[in-house]
Image (cartoon, helix red, strand yellow):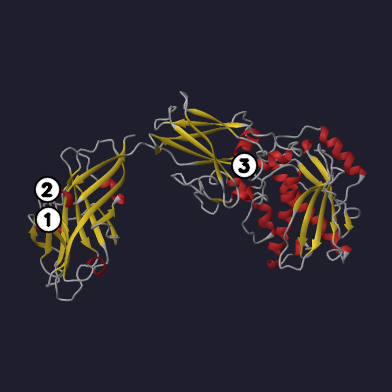
Amino acid sequence: MAFKFPHKFTLVALILAMFAALIPSPALADGQVETSSLKTHTIKFYLDPALAADLGFAKMVLPKYVDDMNAILAKNTNRRLLFDAQTGIIVAESQPHTDSAMPPLPTEDFEIWAHAVYTDQAVSYGGYAGMDASGAGALAGLRWTKLYDPDALTSADVWDYTTQLDHMLHELAHVLGAGIGEYYSLMSVTDSTSVAPLMDINIYNANDPFWSDKPDFMRDPLLRFTETTSRAQYLSTVQFSNLTAAVMSGSYRNGIPSFEQFTVQVLDESGQPASNVNVKVWNVEGFYPYASQLLLDAATDANGQVTVAWGTSTGSHNAYNFLRLIKVYRDGNPAAEPRYVSIYDGDIAALVNQSSAQVTTIKLAPQTQSATFASIAAKDGWTLEAGENANTGKTKDTAASALRLGDDAGRAQYRGILSFDTSSLPDNAVITKVMLQVKKQGVTGGGNPLNLFRGFLADIRNGAFGASSLESADWQSPAHKTVGPFTPALVNGWYALDLSAAATQVNKAAGGLTQIRLRFKLDDNNNGAANYLTLFSGNAAAANRPQLIVEYYIP
């Protein structure tokens, strides 16, 4: 249950609280804070007269605002707000704070001043953290459409009311030193290095490599961008991230310790330190056009490490200097997925994980090898259906210099059979990509058969469709995997088909064949005329023969 303060404190309540603080508390669930460690702050509301026209209503509803804020704070921080509706509402148009505070600011027992003015916009908006010379922290610049009774919200009111809460909690976190530089500046970042491989940040991508390991940030009022449909849902889902909570609960109002350096640890495919690997590190600014500056270009040492100075000429917690992009190269080629590291990753290590060192570990991707196989002339060729809708083969030709795909004048379908000896692949090869390349010879019947017959289909067989040599029955023999249809562009006379979805069907056994039956999706076009595409076969000149290109790595 969320800890709640009564709307008005009496001397008796304060005395009881003091005695309670001296009594040891039982262990609490994860994320909760023992009441003995609570740090309280009196909150006062400075309201535009237009918002406080009915002062009695304001006195009734604002305690509920504070209760809801405390419900969020109680989840994983030691901060609480005290509010007396009789003395804590001041009707004033101008901001109460001076913004002239000089450090050091008090980190405990200071007041919080929320200053809200009326807006005639459709929704409430605005807010910034201010510091008064007295030491008070201001939730300033709040622009509200109206005051709400949280117990009587309509569905249309929920978004606006929870927005008001969000903005106050957001600025309260800033007052306590959290989120300086703004998490939302990292919602979307473009890799401007022009050095491959490129990697952007996009919080809306569930698999984004930067945000996918920070799910707790999605509920944090400093970043939260999802809509809630009820007050109850808001109170149950919104929670400060572990980092924000750690800062708010600590004494960091005068600044979080500077982040001086971090270590990049590079591991090879087996998890061992990888030495002499090139590491490049850029500073990427957190706003358009996301300017980047190369900070480091060095090789890993014998321990597979490089140390990166953060380079804090203007302070580490600002959008000019709070993000690093790491890229790793081996033999001049990209060797791992790029990695972003932000100042907040460093803060998580230091303040949440209590680690004295920030280490970013990057494991090298396996080194890929490539093997190219040509179709075997004696085992490839074309087969022709016995007749329209016969669904069995009758005619074959293994000596032709071209395969046929399409139909004849009798509406029987042509199919091509390709045969590759892939047995030279290592038994332990992990195949990552399979490409089939076939070269166009010509067209019979006019038009573009690829469009007329709705694209290529490829039937893949681990082994032979029947006997290893071409047979009429290869027309209908079952395949292990069918992929397509493909409608690839013709590039320099070649079609390229990505068969990676059938990578497991590539035969690595000794003496093994991988056979591919190439056909069109539409069996015939019913025009009573021969229409077919011819592709060079294994009988053609070596430069024109079909090729199967297999990329793999050895684990």
Q: Residues within 10 Å of mark 1 (few under 14, many from 20)?
A: many
The mark nearer the N terminus, 3 or 1, is 3
Residue, far bottom: 527
In this rendered view, identify the residue nearer to me: 400 or 454.
400
User: Mark 1 falls on what kind of element?
Assistant: strand
Which residue is rendered at x = 68% and y = 66% of the image? 155
Q: Which residue is mark 1?
A: 381
Asked if labels 2 and 3 touch by Cβ distance under 8 angstroms, the answer is no
Q: Please, is residue 203 above or below residue 371 in the view?
A: below
Disc 3 residue type (three-letter): Phe
Q: Which residue is mark 3?
A: 322
Q: Is residue 1 visible?
A: no
- Residue 173 percent across, percent down from the top left: 73, 46
Q: Is residue 173 visible?
A: yes
User: Mark 2 falls on what kind of element?
Assistant: loop
In this rendered view, identify the residue nearer to me: 90 or 322.
322
Q: Which residue is mark 2?
A: 468
The mark nearer the N terminus, 3 or 2, is 3
Q: Please, is residue 303 above or below residue 80 in the view?
A: above
The mark nearer the N terminus, 1 or 2, is 1
Foreground tag (3 vs 1): 3
Disc 2 residue type (three-letter): Ser
Disc 1 residue type (three-letter): Gly
Quadrant containing the C terminus in the rendered view: top left
User: Is 63 left, or right, of 551 in this rendering?
Assistant: right
